[in-house]
Image (cartoon, helix red, strand yellow):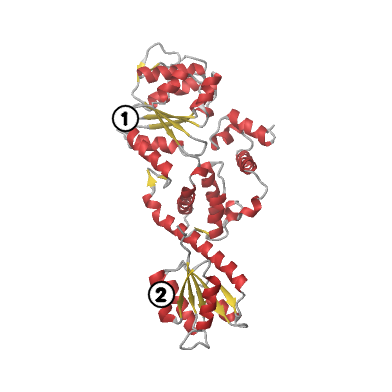
Amino acid sequence: MTPTKPKLLIVDDDEEIRTQMRWALTRDYDIVLAEDRVSALKIFQAERPMVVLLDLGLPPSPGTPEEGLKTLAELLEVERLTKVVVITGQGEKQVALQAIGAGAYHFQCKPVEMDELKILLARCFYIAELEREYHALQQGLGTTAFESIIGANARMQNVFSAIKKVAQSNAPVLILGESGTGKEMVARAIHNRSARKDGPFVAINCSAIPEALMESELFGHEKGSFTGAHALRKGRFESAEGGTLFLDELGEIPLLLQVKLLRFLQESRIERVGGRQEIAVDTRVIAATHVDLTQAMTAGTFREDLFYRLAVVQINLPPLREREDDVILLAQSCLKKFAAESGSSGFTFTPKAIDALKRHTWPGNVRELQNRVRRATIMSSGKRITPEDLELSSGAATQNGVTLKEARETVEREMIQQALRKHGGKISAAAIELDVSRPTFYELMDKLGIKRPE
């Protein structure tokens, strides 16, 4: 099938010029013609072209721009996203600027240079398509959210379906996905849709807890069980009684504690550090990790029996680079949220910013997108967010000769250095912010050539 050509409306009272324009542009566009304001408005309402080429000298007074300017206003009143290019006579710069002020996208002086006009029209259609897509996404935000998770992408719709199903059971769930993909949000969604929704949701990042303290943190301890244990302390399993315990970065749990976790999953009982009595606990476990547990099992750092006990249900979150149709949805949602937090409103992305958001590979996933949009709302000098506000390239040309690996490393280096500056060089705090373990953080620093703080 022949692809449908974009529709272009040409408004000019000179039949010869209309014919010449049609002949020159018909290869690229579906041309519709009008000779005056009345016919232009009628055809525009019927055909809804994205771009209009408008001569300002229209009857009944072709020698003045008044009728053309009136036509411009009426067209934009019907559809404000339309890109109108006005045609003016030589030396009528003031008229052209008046048209731009009234909403025209650009102007061309007579006689029209056709090659130049073709380039301008191609840009108009490109920008118009981006703006209409963006507007449609704005309108659709409310229908693509599921438990505060934004996602129109087919794979995300499968995730939402899995959440609905697994929420009805008490089975353990294993959530897999790269850092920044929203694993905790999925865990919360499961909890909120379960019969345990009125109970506590307790989240713990296992990579942020020193190994020596992890057993006490998870299972609690008895008074006097070790130096400094001045009182009985309940662990996270007991704190989540009647609700859900979310174990993030599961792969960081030491082997000895994996045995205790396995026993809980089998018997729903725990034993505090220094305790001699088993305690029955009614807590559902949802775990998550960004590491490959299959490799961890092969390496002997993760128990195979624990994996199969936890992975009764697995939910795989796709990285943002595989959710192209969600990027603008998420960006707009973040923009609205962060603007509201700062007491502002009316922020929008420029077409170039939308293009840059689509081109970026998002190695930091949704968390990176959130950080960039939050920064843009703070640093922008106006209400229109540009690629520079997002610290993104505004076009593909600047990426020539750069591999995907190099681009990802550039962003990773920037995020790590930014986190280190924010936390005064403290590795633990920076690793927590970026949702990676300390060992992984050190590995990334070494790989990217970042000097370790003294």
* The image quarter in which residue 420 lies: top right
Comparing 438 with 133, the one in front is 133
CA–CA distance in space, label 1 to label 2 = 58 Å
**Location of residue 186 (image quadrant):** top left
Q: In the rendered image of this protein, does residue 36 appear above or below residue 330?
A: below
Q: Is residue 362 above or below residue 248?
A: below
Looking at the image, which residue is at 53% across and 20% down? 298
Relative side of 98 to 222, left or right: right
Under mark 2, the amino acid is: Ile
On the question of residue 234 being in view, the answer is no
Q: Which element is circle 2 on?
A: helix
Q: Position of residue 382 (x, y in %)?
A: 55, 61
269 over 156 or under it: above or below: above
Mark 1, Cα crowd under 10 Å, few <14 / some 14-19 / many 20+, is few
Q: Nearer the viewer, residue 424 or 144?
A: 144
Which residue in the structure is indicated by mark 2?
A: 43
Rendered location of residue 225, percent (x, y):
47, 14
The residue type indicated by label 1 comes to Ser
Q: Which residue is mark 1?
A: 169
Q: State the residue lying farthest toward the top.
A: 276
